[in-house]
Amino acid sequence: MSRPKSHILYVEPDYDPVFIDFESARYKESPKNFSSIIQAIFVRHPSSEYLRDIYNLNLEKIRRYIYIYNKSRSEETVNYILTKIFNL
């Protein structure tokens, strides 16, 4: 995925971020691009090392979370990973 920042829109009324994959450009109940956006933010982005430090992550943790997601690709797994990363 190139330029992941351009794939994130903020939707009213709460301005929640919504990720749109313009390459596939269709709505799916179970999108399969979660691992791509996690990698784009925590691995390939110029600020990745800084973000990993803030959230106390290392590349091994990121890889493990992506592996877990790719095994199940469920909403519960996404919520679990986001909770682990961001302490929600």
Image (cartoon, rainbow, N blue to C red):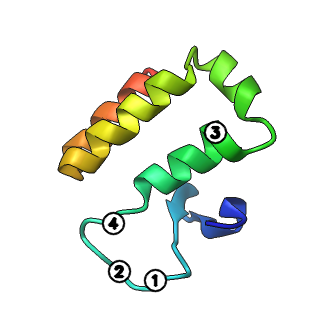
Please tell me whether residue 49 is drawn above or below residue 32 in the rendered image.
above
What residue did someone put label 1 on? Answer: 24
From where the camera sits, is residue 62 visible?
yes
Residue 27 numbered mark, or none: 2
Q: Is residue 8 left or right of residue 19?
A: right
Please tell me whether residue 21 is drawn above or below residue 37 in the rendered image.
below
Distance (Cα) linking label 2 and label 4? 8 Å
- Looking at the rendered structure, the kind of residue marked 4 is Pro
Label located before the other in sequence (2 or 3): 2
What residue did someone put label 4 on? Answer: 31
6 or 15: which is nearer to us? 6
- Looking at the rendered structure, the kind of residue marked 2 is Tyr
63 or 29: which is nearer to us? 63
Label 2 close to label 1 by CB (< 8 Å)? no
- Looking at the rendered structure, the kind of residue marked 1 is Ser
Categorize mark 3 by other alpha carbons within 10 Å: few (<14), some (14-19), many (20+).
some
Residue 43 numbered mark, or none: 3
Mark 4 or mark 3: which is in front? Answer: 3
Distance (Cα) linking label 2 and label 3? 26 Å
Distance (Cα) linking label 1 and label 3? 23 Å
Mark 1 or mark 3: which is in front? Answer: 3
Numbered disc 1: secondary structure: loop
**Which percent across, then down, holds residue 35?**
44, 50
Q: Is residue 75 left or right of residue 17?
A: left
Residue drawn at (64%, 39%) of the image: 43
Please tell me whether residue 47 is drawn above or below residue 88 in the rendered image.
below
Categorize mark 1 by other alpha carbons within 10 Å: few (<14), some (14-19), many (20+).
few
Residue drawn at (56%, 20%) of the image: 58
Label located before the other in sequence (1 or 3): 1
Numbered disc 3: secondary structure: helix
Mark 2 or mark 3: which is in front? Answer: 3
From where the camera sits, is residue 13 visible?
no
